[in-house]
Amino acid sequence: MAACRSADLRLLTSSTLRWYRSSHNVERGFCSRCGGNLFWRATSSGEIFISAGTLDPPTGLHLSKHIFVGSKSDFYDLTDGLPQEQEG
């Protein structure tokens, strides 16, 4: 999943927005009407990361790095030359 940071607090005003604490460090924001996974929030900093696939194009987004590459599946390769970070 691709995600991007957002400081846009308007995301927090939807009447259908619900939060689920999926781990000690992360809460997931989803739509209570359709169940769509929209974004996640780091509990330590409050930073919100939007699922890039939920944005209408043109997004103007570009990949900057790959994270959690140690747990990616073996059916694809990361060959674009961007930095790659392991877990934690």
Image: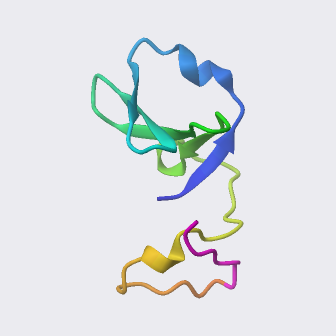
Residue that lies at the very extreme toward the left in this rendered image? 34
Image height of 88 relative to 28, above or below: below
Q: Can you say whether 12 is above or below 78 in the image? A: above
Q: How far from the left and from the top, in percent, is residue 49? A: 59, 43
The residue closer to the viewer here, 40 or 32, is 40
Residue 3, how many percent across, how many down?
A: 57, 52
Which span is picked out in magenta? 81-88
State the residue at coordinates (55%, 83%): 78
Tell me: residue 46, above or below residue 23.
above
Q: Please name the residue shown 71% across and 66% down the image.
A: 64
Give the prevailing secondary structure in the magenta stretch.
Answer: loop
Q: Residue 38 colored magenta?
A: no
- On whether residue 85 falls in the magenta region, the answer is yes
Q: How many marks?
A: 0
Quadrant in which residue 44 is drawn: top right
Q: Quadrant of the C terminus?
A: bottom right
Picture residue at 54% right of the left edge, 42% below the top: 55
Q: Is residue 43 left or right of residue 75?
A: right
Kindly indicate the quadrant of the structure image that contains residue 66. Answer: bottom right
Q: In which quarter of the view is residue 67 placed?
A: bottom right
